[in-house]
Image (spheres, rainbow, N blue to C red):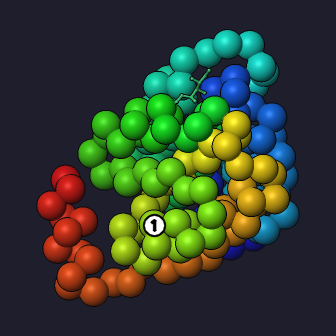
Amino acid sequence: MNNITVAIAADHAGYGLKEELKKYVSDLGYDILDCGTNSQESVDYPDFGKAVADSIIGGRAERGVLVCGTGIGISISANRYQGIRAAVCHDVTTARYAREHNDANVIALGARIIGTSVAKDCLNVFLSTPFENNERHLKRIMKLD
Ligand code: RB5
C-alpha cells in the first residue's frame, strides 16, 4: 500500500473496463474508492464525473479515474468542478504530459476507443509520473481556477 486513494467511476459504457482497472490499480498498491456504476444498465455520465470530483475535492481520494464510451463526456463533467483537472488520455504520451504539464488529478479513458492494455499503460504512467513543479506550469494551472 502507498497511502494514495484512487477514486474510480464509469457509466454503463465504461463499466467493464472500470472493473478491470480496479483490479489493476489495486495490484499496483493503491486503495480504491469505487463510485459506481455497478452494472451495464444505462446511466448518465455526469453523475459519475461528479462523484469522483466530489471525492477528490472532499479529500477522500487523491486521484481519479473516469471511464465512459469516449472519455469525453465524463471528463467534461468532472472539469466543471473547481480544482479538478481531468484529462482524456489515449496513450502513454498524453498520460505523461497530463501529469508533467497539467498536474491532472483525474484521467479519463474511452472504453470504446482504447483497449484494456493501453488503458492500463495510461493509468500506470498517470499514477507514477510527477508534476513538473515549476513556475511556468504553476502559473498556467493557477489561471484555470
Ligand atoms: C454512452 O452511450 C456514451 O455517450 C458515453 O459513454 C460517452 O461516450 C459520452 O461522452
Q: Would you say 3 lies left or right of 29 here?
A: left
- Foreground residue among 14 and 60: 14
Residue at figure coordinates x 31%, y 52% from the top left: 83
Q: Quadrant of residue 68?
A: top right
Going by the numbered disc 1, the residue's amino acid type is Ala
Q: Would you say 22 lies left or right of 57 here?
A: right
x%, y% of residue 64?
55, 51
Q: Quadrant of the N terminus?
A: bottom right
Label 1 element class: helix
User: Residue beneath label 1, please?
Assistant: 98
x%, y% of residue 93?
56, 72
10 Å crowding of disc 1: few (<14), some (14-19), many (20+): many
x%, y% of residue 120?
75, 60
Q: Is residue 3 visible from the viewing direction of this image?
A: no
Residue at figure coordinates x 78%, y 50% from the top left: 115
Q: Ligand 1, what quadrant?
A: top right
